[in-house]
Image (cartoon, rainbow, N blue to C red):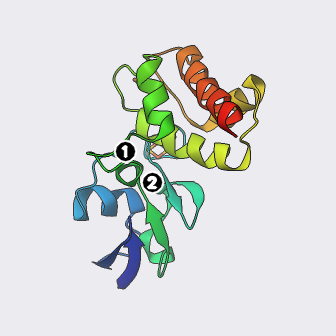
Amino acid sequence: MTVTLRINGSICRFNGDPMTPLVNVLRHERFLTGTKAVCREGFCGACTVHVDGEAVMSCLRPVGLLEGASVTSIEAMSSGDGPLHPLQAAFEAADAVQCGMCFPGMVMSLSHFLRDHPDACRADVKAAMVGNICRCTGYERIIDAVMDVIAGVRAHG
Ligand code: FES
Ligand code: FES
């Protein structure tokens, strides 16, 4: 089966098993290895990307369902040479990342959440992170980083 989708703005034509998980297409076909495959069962959130503007776990999304879809992965959140996404910068400033396996999925989930909840309180942020597991940090610095982003939006909004 051939599936045509857009990944980070570029057309991607996938030929193969339509049940191939999107995370495999990203990592193996496009070499976009920023998206992590950890549990592959929908529990950890490390594989989160945006599909047509919604945050989804790419390990659970068969590519055969994505004809015409627009996918955004962590690689598109900053250009590399350009500025970091505000969440990436805040995570770095708050020293909120250790091994980094959860980090791309956190950024993709939380950027989607903040788009719709720019005024979220700490409890809201905690609730929004329920689908993203971090084995290293204890979460508090991650939440601190997100609250810093929200404070910056408030200050400049
Ligand atoms: S790898 Fe997809 S949720 Fe864990
Ligand atoms: S920093 Fe290691 S899993 Fe989150």
Q: Amino acid at mark 2?
A: Cys
For the point 24% across and 59% down, the residue is: 28
The percent coordinates of residue 81 (x first, y second) are 26, 45
Q: Which residue is mark 2?
A: 59
Element carrying mark 1: loop
On the picture, is 110 further left or further right than 10? right
The percent coordinates of residue 31 (x first, y second) are 22, 57
For the point 60% across and 59% down, the residue is: 54
Using the rendered view, name the quadrant where residue 23 is placed: bottom left
The percent coordinates of residue 74 (x first, y second) are 40, 49
Using the rendered view, name the quadrant where residue 8 is placed: bottom left
Asked if 58 appears above or below 157 in the picture, the reply is below
CA distance for labels 2 and 1: 7 Å
On the picture, is 105 further left or further right than 78? right
**Ligand 1 has an atom within 8 Å of the beta carbon of the residue at disc 1:** yes
Instruction: Judge by depth and name the residue closer to the eye, 24 or 152.
Output: 152
Q: Which residue is mark 1?
A: 37
**Ligand 1 has an atom within 8 Å of the beta carbon of the residue at disc 2:** yes
The percent coordinates of residue 25 (x first, y second) are 32, 64
Residue 15: tell me if it is visible: no
Asked if 50 appears above or below 77 in the picture, the reply is below
